[in-house]
Image (cartoon, helix red, strand yellow):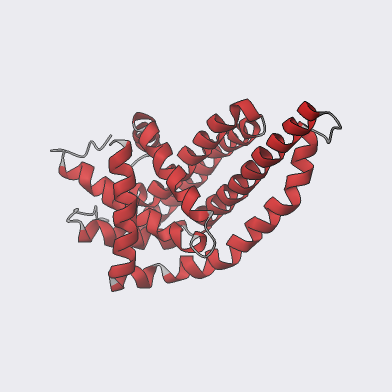
Amino acid sequence: MNIISAISSLIAGIRLTLSDVSVRKLATVPWLSALGLYPFSLLIAYYAHPYLLSWVSSPSDTFWGSLYYAVAWAVVGLVALLGSLFASFLVLLILLSFIQEPIARRVLVLSGVTIPTSSGGMLAETRALSSSVFRALGMLTLLAPLFLISLALSLIPILAPLGIACAAWILALQCFDPVFEVLQLSLKDRFKIAFNNKLAFAAFGLTVLLVAAIPLLGFIITPMAVAGAAIDTAKRLRKTTNSDIS
């Protein structure tokens, strides 16, 4: 997986979600949920901006002080916007993880991937559901500290690009997570794939963040990103002779 492949998969996911009726129907619920969450994230960024700016700089009467304040104002504004959007997407993807899985499953099937099936029976279904819940909680537990680190780095102007890249990587992992859940991958395998393709994941997540920052487009990108993740995973599965998609 490389950066170009990751971005092209995201574009393919956008096209498929818009063109395929079955995928578009599954995306309706995430779209309606994100429609309310998206303006809320913008409101958070608006009110958080002056508070975060006071940590970094303050108005000055000198030329260089004013220049530094102007740059800090722009950087903090961008960080607040991207941070609030990322937090909103993270919450949305966690809350809608079970709704996103049908999208991932449908796109994988359309891409010709064989989906693992349960052995059947109430006990097997209960175990599968319990494992899914524990994996979701484990993912949240592991990603929360990384998110706090990326947020802290984003507040330091010189380290802001690193913080944004880290946040984008986390977002990409959340987009791929429903796909990994359908394929019944362990948490270890999920993080292995994400770390082995860290630059591509960061590019994927950053592209999602940039699209999300565009008014009227932000609330529809989430299910499209999951579709793109499924397409990318399917492409890598076709290139292997076994279940190793790292």
Res 58 quadrant in image? top right
Q: Extreme front residue here? A: 63
- Taking the view exactly as shown, the residue that stands out farthest to the right is 61
Residue drawn 41% across the image and 55% down it? 129
* Any part of residue 120 in sight: no
Nearer-the-camera pick, 76 or 168: 76
Q: Nearer the viewer, residue 219 or 126?
A: 219
Using the image as rendered, state which of residue 108 and residue 203 is in the foreground: 203
Report the quarter where the C terminus lies. Answer: top left
Quadrant of the rendering where the N terminus is positioned:
top left
Is residue 14 visible in this depiction of the protein? yes
User: In the rendered image of this protein, does residue 246 appear above or below residue 82?
Assistant: above
Vertical placement of 32 versus 75: above or below?
below
Number of labelled discs?
A: 0
Residue 206 percent location from the top left of the image: 46, 43
117 displayed left or right of 51: left
**What residue lies at 86% left-to-right and 32% top-to-bottom?**
61
Furthest residue in direction left, as rendered:
241
Place of residue 95 in the rendered image (x, y in percent of width and height, measured from the top left) = 53, 57
Q: Position of residue 163 (x, y in %)?
A: 56, 33
Residue drawn at (64%, 30%) of the image? 157
173 sits to left or right of 213: left
Q: Is residue 129 above or below residue 4?
A: below
- Residue 216 in the image, given as x and y percentages of width and height: 52, 65
